[in-house]
Amino acid sequence: MTNLRIPGPTPCPDVVLKEMGRQMINHRGPEFKKVLFDVTDKLKQVFKTKNDVFVLTGSGTGGLEAAVVNSFSPGDKVLSVSIGVFGDRFAAIAKEFGADVIDLKYDWGKAADAGEIREALNKEPAIKAVLVTHNETSTGVTNDLAGISSVVKESGKLLVVDAISSLGSIELPIDKWQCDVVVTGSQKGWMVPPGLTMVSVSQQAWQANAEATMPRFYWDFAKAKSYIEKGQTPWTPAVSILFALDVALDMIIKKGIDTIIAHQAHIAQMTRDGVKALGLSLFADEKYASNTVTSIAAPDGLDVIKMLKILREEHDTVLGGGQQHMAGKIFRIGHLGWITEEDINMVLKSLTIALPQAGVEIGD
Ligand SMILES: *Cc1c(COP(=O)(O)O)cnc(C)c1O
C-alpha cells in the first residue's frame, strides 16, 4: 500500500472503505435519518460541544465559505489572522463576499501573537469577528487557539475558526474555548475520503446569522437547521461518505478522542526527532510545530521536486511539497488521521536513501 503522507486526503482503514461500497438509500427516508442523527451526535461528542453541528457536502473550503456567508453582511469589519496559505484563503473568501477585511499577517513558519490580536481589536472597535486558522497546514504551525480565544472573548467578538486539519487530531474543546463557528473536513484527521465538511455553530453565531445578509443558498445554516430537525439535509448529501464517517467515528470514540490526540502528538514528536536526526531543520517555529503536519526546510542543494519523485516512484511514499512561494523551499510530511509509528519509520528510512540522491548528504 502506498505510504500516503500528505496532509489530506489521508489513508482510510478497510472497514471505512467497505462502507463506501454500500447500496444507496433514500436520503429522505428513516434509514438515512438514523445515520445523520448518529453521525451528528458522535461529532458533538468528539468536538466537545453542545452547539449545533452540521454535516455539509463539499470540501473544507466550502465550509469556510459557509462560515463567512452565514455570519456577516457586506461591509462588516472582520479581522483576519493569517499565518499562511489557508489563512489567506479565508480572508479572500470574506473579501469576495464584501467584508471589510483587516489583515493581520505573520511570516510563514510563525504563529500568531494573541497580544497583537488584542491590539488590533482595541484599535478598531467596529470589528465584528476574528477569522483564524487553528492549524496552518501550509507551514505546519498550530496557533495558540486557547490564548487567541481568550483575547477575542474579552471583547465579545465572534470567533470563526478554520480547524480543517486540526479538529479530531489536535486538542480543540469547542465549548471550553468558546469558538463560535468551527470548520473541519472529512479527508483530514477523520480517516474518511474527501467530500464532507463538518461545522459547529454557537448561539452567538446564530445571533450574527439572524442579521447577516451576505448572499447564500447552498450553504445556508438556517436551511441546514430546519432540515436536520427532520433527519435530513437540504440537498442530496454524499451518502457514501456519511456511511464512512459513521464507522470512522465509532473507531474514534472507541479509542477515545483524548487517546487519539495524545497518539498524534507522539507521532509528530517522533517525526520531528527523526528528521532532525537526518540533519534537517524544521521550517516551523518548533514551539508551535503542528501535530498533524511537519514542515521541513529544504537544505542548500536539495532538489525537492526530484526527492519527491524518487520517494514516489522508488519507495511508494508520497509527501507534500511547499505551496505558493514555499514551493521548492520546504517539504511536508502529513501525519494526521490513521497512522502508526511504522508509517513514519518507513518515511524516515526512505528519506535516508532519497536525500543523497536528490543532492544532500545526511546526518552531518
Ligand atoms: C485542507 C485545508 C483547507 C482546504 O480544504 P479543502 O477540503 O481542500 O477545500 C483549508 N484550510 C486548512 C487549514 C486545510 O488544511
Image: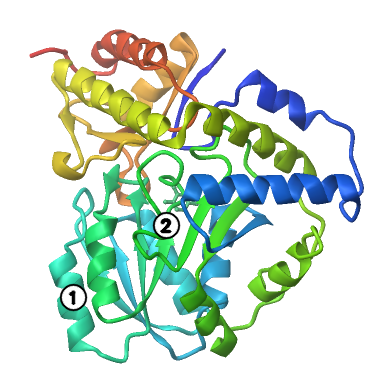
Q: CA distance from mark 1 to mark 2?
A: 21 Å
Crowd band around label 1 with a 10 angstrom C-alpha radius: few (<14), some (14–19), many (20+): some
Mark with earlier residue (1, 2): 1
Q: Element under label 1?
A: helix
**Left or right for 200, reference 158:** right
Q: Give the residue at x 49% y 70%.
A: 93
In which quadrant of the rendered image does the C terminus lie?
top left
Q: Element under label 2?
A: loop
Q: Is mark 1 within 8 Å of ligand 1?
A: no
Q: Is residue 218 visible?
A: no
Q: Find disc 1 in the rendering and name its residue.
A: 118
Q: Is mark 2 within 8 Å of ligand 1?
A: no
User: Can you give x and y, in whole percent of width and height, for residue 85 in the image?
Assistant: 37, 55
User: Can you give x and y, in whole percent of width and height, for residue 34 in the image?
Assistant: 79, 46
Q: Amino acid at mark 1?
A: Arg
In which quadrant of the rendered image does the N terminus lie?
top right
Q: Give the residue at x 35% y 36%.
A: 293
Residue 225 higher or lower than 20, as above or below: below
In front: label 1 or label 2? 2
Q: Quadrant of residue 234?
A: bottom right
Q: Nearer the viewer, residue 207 or 357?
A: 207
Q: Nearer the viewer, residue 249 or 198?
A: 249
**Left or right for 50, reference 141:** right
User: Can you give x and y, in whole percent of width and height, for residue 185 in the image?
Assistant: 55, 48
Q: Nearer the viewer, residue 318 or 329?
A: 318
Q: Amino acid at mark 2?
A: Ile
Residue 29 higher or lower than 353, as above or below: below
Q: Quadrant of residue 52?
A: bottom right
**Left or right for 98, reference 58:** left
Residue 292 higher or lower than 200, as above or below: above
User: Can you give x and y, in whole percent of width and height, for residue 277 in the image?
Assistant: 15, 16
Q: Find disc 2 in the rendering and name its residue.
A: 174
